[in-house]
């Protein structure tokens, strides 16, 4: 029974991290570029709308669920350190929780909050928008990479 639960959690985590990586990849490679090509007021308004809608969408259960699953896999890996796949479980879970969840909480969300506080058409918003595009995308690249590598590590753990 324990092995079935672990296997299920690894599959959920591998697939969930892969989906999250895809979402972040889309933002990093073309969504933010497209928003950056809009005039500042339209770009800010669009990003603020996305930030409102994303927390009301199916993104949030997956975001939170994969984070909890990743943290659980770290604990399970530590408790089974001598078993095959344990190191990959620990590495994948740690990387995901730190590189995706913590980065989101410490960097991306505060940037989103600062953007939401702007009047999109105000002249001073231009400076915020320019910095936001650079900084938010950088941290989103980190989340993308962490999600991809964590997904791969969970697959390695499954194969072990």
Image: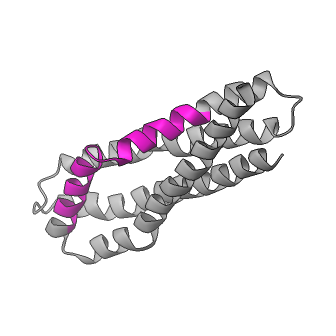
Given the current orientation, which residue lies at the most extreme front position?
A: 1
- Residue 94, x across and y down, in percent: 65, 37
List the single residue furthest toward the right: 82
Tell me the quarter of the picture where residue 87 sits: top right
Residue 4 percent coordinates (x, y): 69, 33
Residue 19 vs 61, above or below: the answer is below
For image coordinates 37% across by 48% down, the residue present is 59
The residue at 29%/50% (across/down) is 54
- Which residue: 56% across, 56% down? 18
Locate residue 145: give its quadrant.
bottom right
Residue at the image point whose x is 16% and y is 51% from the top: 118
Give the prevailing secondary structure in the magenta stretch. Answer: helix
The region drawn magenta spans 43-70
> Does residue 4 appear left or right of residue 135 in this picture?
right
Left or right: where 71 falls relative to 63: right
Front residue of 90/107: it is 90
In the current view of this chain or complex, which residue is farthest to the top?
79
| Quadrant of the rendering where the C terminus is positioned | top right
Q: Quadrant of the N terminus?
A: top right
The image quarter in which residue 12 lies: top right
Quick check: 142 above or below 3?
A: below
Residue 85 placed where, x, y %? 81, 40
Residue 95 among those drawn in magenta: no
45 within the magenta span: yes
* Number of disc labels: 0
Q: Measured from the top left, where is residue 61 in percent x and y?
A: 39, 39
Residue closer to the observer: 45 or 150: 150
Closest to the observer, 35 or 93: 93
């Amino acid at each position: 029974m324990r092995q079935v639960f672990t296997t299920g959690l690894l599959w959920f985590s591998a697939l969930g991290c892969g989906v999250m990586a895809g979402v972040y990849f889309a933002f990093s490679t073309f969504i933010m570029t497209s928003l950056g090509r809009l005039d500042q007021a339209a770009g800010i308004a669009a990003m603020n709308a996305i930030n409102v809608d994303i927390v009301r969408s199916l993104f949030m259960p997956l975001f939170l669920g994969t984070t909890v699953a990743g943290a659980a896999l770290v604990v399970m890996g530590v408790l089974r350190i001598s078993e095959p796949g344990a190191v990959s479980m620990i590495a994948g879970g740690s990387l995901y929780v730190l590189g995706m969840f913590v980065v989101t909480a410490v960097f991306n969300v505060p940037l989103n909050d600062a953007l939401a506080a702007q009047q999109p058409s105000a002249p001073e918003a231009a400076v915020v928008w320019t910095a936001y595009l650079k900084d938010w995308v950088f941290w989103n690249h980190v989340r993308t990479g962490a999600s991809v590598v964590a997904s791969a590590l969970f697959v390695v753990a499954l194969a072990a």
